[in-house]
Amino acid sequence: MIPLASFFTGYRRTALAPDELIAAIEIPKPLPQFMRFYKVAKRRMDDISTVAAAMAIDWDRLGRIRRSRFAFGGVASVPLRALAAEDAILGQRWNDAGVERAQAALERTLDPISDHRGSSEYRLAVAKSLVAKFLWDRREAAA
């Protein structure tokens, strides 16, 4: 078994040997209370993402974040977790101030690549806007 953090080894490269294939993926439970997946690309179908994101949050009974995950693809040679953004909201409420803390952490720690799909600045702006969208999606789901 290969942990996800070790699976991607470089741009378009994985830890799989040429004669190996993925037989199973284990997803630990319990699943997060709220999660969303986003893809930003020029076309909807058959296009490599300029930025992809997966975000998840769990709350305690007082509404404070007890666990969060922010992961991005398309911003580096391998998909990555935004650990500083996760840490920035731990123990806080998921609201506009929480979004600003997570975005500030992305600003400090995310150093996106530039290529024909988008500049580094564009990718950072998209990643930050997806964090805000995650809050709006949560509000909509709670309504």
Image (cartoon, helix red, strand yellow):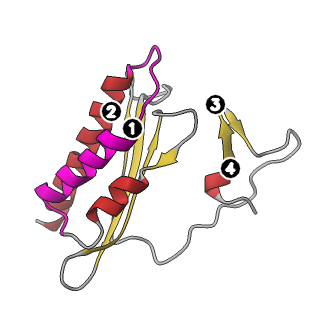
For residue 129, above or below residue 5:
above
Give, as a three-letter code, the residue at label 4. Answer: Phe
- Residue 128 location (% of width, % of height): 27, 40
User: Which quarter of the rendering shows the C terminus?
Assistant: bottom left
For residue 60, above or below residue 77:
below
Does the magenta segment cover residue 83?
no
SS under mark 1: strand
- Disc sitting over residue 124 in the figure: 2
- Residue 137 location (% of width, % of height): 21, 54
Q: Which residue is mark 1?
A: 39
Give, as a three-letter code, the residue at label 1. Answer: Lys
**Is 26 positioned to the left or the right of 137 in the image?**
right
* Range shown magenta: 93-119
The residue shown at (42%, 39%) is: 52
Give, as a three-letter code, the residue at label 2. Answer: Leu
User: Which quarter of the rendering shows the N terminus?
Assistant: bottom right
Q: Residue furthest bottom?
A: 61
Nearer to us: label 4 or label 1: 4
**Is 117 positioned to the left or the right of 8 in the image?**
left
The residue shown at (53%, 42%) is: 79
Q: Earlier in the sequence, mark 4 or mark 1?
A: 4
SS under mark 2: helix
State the image quarter where residue 51 is shown.
Answer: top left
Q: Which residue is mark 3?
A: 11
Give, as a three-letter code, the residue at label 3. Answer: Tyr
Please rate how many residues cluster around mark 3, counting C-alpha atoms within 10 Å: few if below 14, some from 14 to 19, many from 20: few
Q: Which residue is mark 4?
A: 7
Alpha carbon separation for disc pair 3 and 4: 12 Å
SS under mark 4: helix
